[in-house]
Image (tube, rainbow, N blue to C red):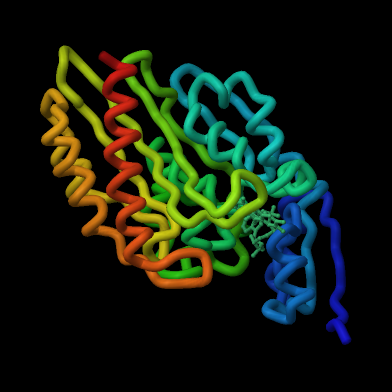
Amino acid sequence: MHATFDLDRPANLAAAFALLKSEGAAALAGGTNLIVDMRAGRERPQRVVSLDRLEALRGIRQTGGQVSIGGRTTVTDLLLSPVIAKTAPALVESARLFAGQMVRNTATVAGNIACGSPAADLVPPLFALDAKLTLVSARGRRTRPIDSFFTGYKTDIRRPTELISRISWKAPTSRSCALFYKLARRKGDAITVVGVAVALDVDRGLCTRARVALGAVAPTVIHAREAEAILEGRPLTPELIDSAAESASAAARPIDDIRASAAYRRHGVRVLVRRLVTQAWERLA
Ligand SMILES: Cc1cc2nc3c(=O)[nH]c(=O)nc-3n(C[C@H](O)[C@H](O)[C@H](O)COP(=O)(O)OP(=O)(O)OC[C@H]3O[C@@H](n4cnc5c(N)ncnc54)[C@H](O)[C@@H]3O)c2cc1C
């Protein structure tokens, strides 16, 4: 038998905050994680607070060099937005490979981040963009880099009464290239075995900024920091790229599971980092 719960649909943020304060409350966005978890008995909220009427959590905006999207932006919204196409091509690629059409229509960006899965596909491209999360509650708002949000497997710094209201990043210049690759058992509707997002900036023949973000190979999405340091400040050569790929593979802490062995995942990281960094560098050349 399934547990019973109260369902509320607050019309504004203040009402949502008040409801989220109650014992056993959980925010509901697209429900593509939460409802699945409730049906499986992994989550048993007593009060479900739907965010579906909160317009403050919607909208994709670009103001000058700054892009900001509401937490309730769906995966389909990402795919339809010219702003996202221009400023976050790696995010578009991960949205394109995300689930199937029905899930894409309801699954939200904040829900993907807050579910805390290391295999959450939108997160590596957001790491590569140095995205920031705005967390709001009745006590006010705070902004944190996405890479300091996660504290461990499915744990994060979010207080129970806080919502991810917006996700923002600096629009990249024309001297930037960002790519994402999802390695999975199938092309569609499959959980990621290895996800890699890479972003490079180039200036006068040098790689001035490198981001290498790895999904599904550690308890959280991670930056391969050493690999980034190997690439930054230099013109990229095949040897340097090999060494960054090796370093990224060493930074991974994958597990064996039904989808792949840890050794396969490490190998996947090495191959994909080498491939994506090479492709990004060639496009910028
Ligand atoms: C068939 C299927 C296929 C899937 N395929 C993929 C895939 O390819 N890639 C992938 O990454 N995921 C996939 N998922 C998982 C899921 O769709 C995503 O993680 C999705 O982005 C979750 O968003 P949601 O809006 O549905 O979140 P919900 O299920 O509504 O919520 C998930 C969690 O986030 C919290 N939350 C939601 N919104 C906020 C907010 N604004 N602030 C704070 N907390 C919030 C909720 O309280 C809950 O804890 C799949 C799921 C299904 C059922």
Q: Position of residue 65 (x, y in %)?
A: 44, 20
Judge left or right: residue 280 versus residue 209.
Answer: right
What residue sits 30% from the left and 60% below the top? 252
Q: From the viewer's perspective, is 21 left or right of 263?
A: right
Residue 197, image quadrant: top left
Report how many numbered discs are placed on residues in the image: 0
Quarter where residue 235 is shown: top left
Q: Position of residue 195 (x, y in %)?
A: 44, 49
Name the residue furthest bottom: 1
Q: Residue at x 74, y 60 (%)?
A: 28
Residue 242 location in percent, x, y? 17, 40
Above or below, comparing residue 27 to residue 277 in the picture: below
Q: Nearer the viewer, residue 250 or 67?
A: 250
The answer to which of 16 and 280 lies nearer the viewer is 280
Quadrant housing the N terminus: bottom right
x, y percent for residue 256: 41, 72
- Split into quadrants, the picture shows ligand 1 in the one at bottom right
In the image, is residue 269 above or below residue 74?
below
Query: Residue at image x 26%, y 34%?
Result: 210
Q: Is residue 31 above or below residue 179?
A: below
Q: Nearer the viewer, residue 199 or 9?
A: 199
- In the rendered image, the quadrant that contains the C terminus is top left
Residue at image point 44% right, 24% down: 171
- Residue 144 appears in the rendering: no
Residue 61 visible, this angle = yes
